[in-house]
Structures are given as C-alpha cells and as structure tokens.
Amino acid sequence: MAQLAMMVAVEGGENDAQWQLLRELNCPVLQGYHLVKLLPTQVVTDWIKTFIPAHIG
C-alpha cells in the first residue's frame, strides 16, 4: 500500500521561542511575523511586477 505524506505549515510564528518549539516538534514550515514583517501594499505590488517577468517570462 502506498504511503501518503502531508506537510503542515504553521501560521503565526511570532518569536524565536515559538520557532524553536516547532522545530523540536519536527514542523518544517513556519510562516509569520518572526520570519517576514508585513510590507506595504505598494512594495509588494512593485516586487510582483519585477519578479514575474524576470522569473516566468
């Protein structure tokens, strides 16, 4: 029988202590303020306009 695998991403990692705990629990994906601060809309829009043509064609 084939084995199925599921990857879980944790949302809301706010500090280093939470990140360390999740690593101890073998959670490989963390998303949240601790890793990337919120960006203004215009910064994200400008990045998308640059990234997509450069990487997708």
Image: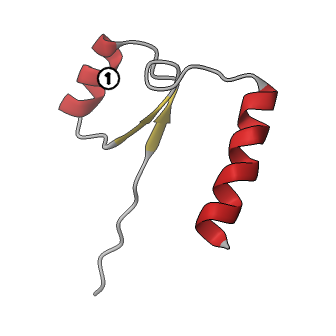
Q: In the image, residue 3 lies at what x, y percent?
A: 29, 76
Task: Name the residue: 31% across, 44% down.
Answer: 28
Q: Quadrant of the C terminus?
A: bottom right
Q: Please state which amino acid type lies under the numbered disc 1.
A: Trp
Residue at (46% x, 15% y) in the render: 14
Where does residue 7 sit, x and y in percent of width and height? 40, 55
Other-residue count near label 1 (Cα within 10 Å), few / some / many at <14 / 14–19 / ≥20 = many
Q: Quadrant of the N terminus?
A: bottom left
Image-quadrant location for residue 16: top left
| Type of colouring | secondary structure
How many marks the image carries: the answer is 1
In this rendering, the answer to whether 53 lies above or below 25 is below
User: Within the image, what quadrant is residue 51 found in?
Assistant: bottom right
Q: Secondary structure at mark 1?
A: helix
Residue depicted at 75% across the width and 22% down the height: 40
Front-lying residue, 28 or 49: 49
Point out residue 48 in the picture as x, y percentages from the top left corner: 72, 48
- Above/below status of 30 relative to 7: above
Residue 34 placement, left or right of 4: right
The foreground one among 30 and 43 is: 43
What residue is shown with label 1? 19
Q: Position of residue 26 (x, y in %)?
A: 23, 40
Furthest-bottom residue in this view: 1
Q: Left of 29 or right of it: where is 37?
A: right
| Above/below status of 43 relative to 29 | above
Task: Please determine whether, in this image, residue 6 is positioned above or below residue 49.
Answer: below
